[in-house]
Amino acid sequence: MPTDILPETPSRRRFIGVAAAALAAGALSQLAFAETGQSITEIAPPAGGDKDAIRPLHVKVPESQLVDLKRRIKATRWPERETVTDASQGVQLATMQRVARYWST
């Protein structure tokens, strides 16, 4: 049994996999660093110094981001319907479509 470990031979499948991972990482980095100077949440200071008190949380999201989110949700390309009638393959397509419809309106 040889002890030398041969480098993996280049293949089209490996190249496509690495390229897809690079594209996904690039897309995610754009989301992660989009408008970082803007805070979207604001927590009220504790009343009377009680750190365990329930305080209101205010969320401020620019209208342009909400419009873009709704547009992307409406543009979703859905997979084929699942082949089983139970949730063994994950969340049912109809359920996800109802959630998407809710968030797009």
Image (cartoon, rainbow, N blue to C red):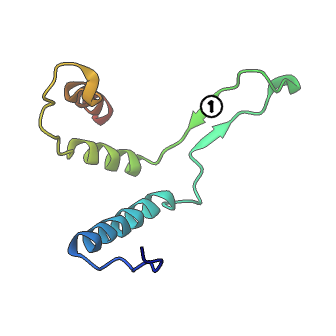
The part of the image, by quadrant, that contains residue 31 is bottom left
Taking the spot 65% from the left edge, 27% from the top edge, the residue there is: 56
Q: Is residue 9 left or right of residue 47?
A: left
**Most distant residue in the front direction:** 1
Q: Is residue 25 left or right of residue 32?
A: left
Where is the C terminus found, in terms of image quarters?
A: top left
Please determine whether, in this image, residue 24 is positioned above or below residue 66: below
| Rendered location of residue 61, percent (x, y) | 48, 44
| Residue nearer the viewer, 56 or 77 | 77
Q: Depth check: 98 or 25 in front? A: 25
Residue shown at 35% from the left, 76% from the top: 8
Quarter in which the N terminus is drawn: bottom left
**Where residue 6 sits in the image (x, y, percent)?**
39, 80
Instruction: Give whichever of 43, 26 is nearer the camera.
Output: 26
**Quadrant in the picture for residue 51:** top right
81 to 40, vertically: above or below = above
User: Residue 43's spot in the image, x, y percent?
Assistant: 68, 36
- Crowding at mark 1 (Cα within 10 Å: few <14, some 14-19, many 20+): few
Residue identifier under label 1: 57
Give the amino acid type for the residue marked by disc 1 in the picture. Answer: Leu
Residue 28: image x %, image y %? 42, 59
